[in-house]
Image (cartoon, rainbow, N blue to C red):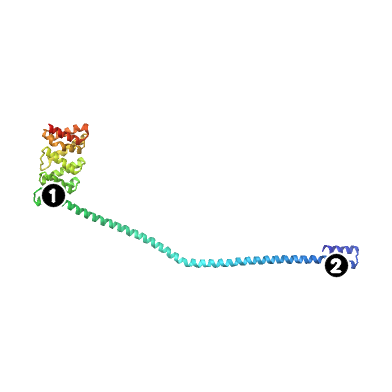
């Protein structure tokens, strides 16, 4: 375009001829034709490229659209499944709640059954204990009847009195009757045996020793020193008082005094000692040895030699 303008300007300025102008114009057109064709080709090629790119882009968008549709269908299917699952989930939640409630109810019932079971077993144990106690009491009463000869009324009174003694001293009736049987075997009657058994229970309490040991010691001391059993039991109570008093004031226990006197009572009595003097010898001898059993044995030998 710039060449054409230059030619026209030159023609005007130079007053060129028509034939010259036409020749110049044709020359320009010949030059422009390949340029136009190339431009057209370039434009066409560019358009084709653009078209190809557009087609490719369209294809990509179509794929994306199809995938989007498939995703939409998938989401729709998921939504449908979710809708189907909702009742199941609600039912499961309901069942879970019912299961938890059932466990709670079962726990309450189990606790109730356990409590009832414990009560029933407690009653059963008490019944069994009662039966065993009755059997043991009957056995001890049979033993008492074997070594004494009293009427049924006397035995009935003894049975009631034994229960009262046991209650007073915090013992059981069976222990009182068993102790009475031991005294009855030595020739004491039913009433005397009960008095001795009561004092044996007392000695067991103050001396913190078993009833068997207290019974054996009291028998040996009473027999060794020739102490008679009075109806009130005062003579036998004196033995218990002496043992308790000395044990509370000197370095020897009530059980130690009882054991030492049990071993030496007869010998010391034959040697001319009273129970008070014998007890003093036991305490003095034990101060150095600190072994009541050995002291009792030694005093027993001394009494025999004397």
Secondary structure under badge 2? helix
- Residue at 88 percent across and 67 percent down: it is 23
The image position of residue 118, as x and y in percent, is 28, 56
Q: Quadrant of residue 31?
A: bottom right
Q: Is residue 117 left or right of residue 233?
A: right
Q: Residue at x 20, y 39 (%)?
A: 255
Helix, strand or loop at label 1? It is helix
| Residue 107 against residue 268 in the figure, above or below | below
Q: Quadrant of the N terminus?
A: bottom right
Residue at image coords 85%, 66%? 27
Residue tagged 1: 143
Find residue 52 and report its horizontal and vertical position in percent.
Answer: 68, 66
Name the spot of residue 131 as percent of width and height, x first: 19, 54
Q: Earlier in the sequence, mark 2 or mark 1?
A: 2
**Residue position marked by numbered label 2 in the rendering:** 26
Q: Nearer the viewer, residue 281 or 106?
A: 281
In the displayed structure, 2 sits above or below 281; it is: below
* Pointers 2 and 1 in contact (C-beta within 8 Å): no
| Label 2 packing within 10 angstroms: few (<14), some (14-19), many (20+) | few
């Amino acid at each position: 375009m710039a060449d054409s303008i230059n030619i026209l300007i030159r023609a005007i300025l130079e007053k060129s001829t028509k034939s010259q102008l036409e020749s110049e114009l044709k020359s320009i057109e010949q030059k422009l034709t390949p340029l136009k064709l190339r431009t057209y080709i370039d434009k066409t090629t560019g358009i084709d490229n653009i078209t190809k790119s557009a087609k490719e882009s369209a294809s990509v968008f179509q794929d994306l659209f199809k995938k989007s549709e498939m995703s939409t269908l998938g989401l729709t299917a998921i939504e449908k499944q979710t809708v189907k699952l909702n009742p199941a989930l609600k039912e499961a939640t309901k069942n879970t709640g019912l299961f938890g409630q059932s466990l709670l109810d079962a726990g309450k019932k189990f606790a109730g059954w356990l409590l009832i079971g414990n009560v029933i077993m407690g009653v059963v144990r008490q019944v069994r204990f009662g039966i065993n106690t009755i059997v043991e009491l009957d056995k001890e009463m049979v033993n008492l009847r074997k070594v004494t000869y009293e009427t049924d009324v006397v035995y009935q009174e003894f049975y009631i009195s034994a229960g009262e003694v046991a209650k007073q001293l915090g013992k059981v009736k069976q222990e009182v009757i068993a102790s009475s049987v031991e005294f009855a075997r030595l020739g004491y009657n039913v009433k005397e045996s009960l008095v001795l058994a009561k004092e044996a229970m007392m000695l067991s309490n103050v001396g913190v020793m078993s009833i068997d040991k207290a019974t054996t010691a009291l028998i040996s001391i009473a027999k060794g020193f020739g102490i008679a059993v009075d109806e009130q039991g005062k003579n036998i109570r004196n033995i218990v008082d002496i043992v308790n008093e000395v044990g509370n004031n000197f370095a020897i226990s009530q059980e130690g005094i009882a054991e030492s006197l049990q071993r030496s009572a007869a010998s010391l009595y034959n040697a001319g000692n009273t129970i008070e003097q014998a007890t003093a010898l036991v305490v003095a001898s034990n101060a150095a040895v600190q072994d009541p059993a050995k002291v009792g044995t030694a005093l027993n030998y001394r009494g025999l030699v004397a």
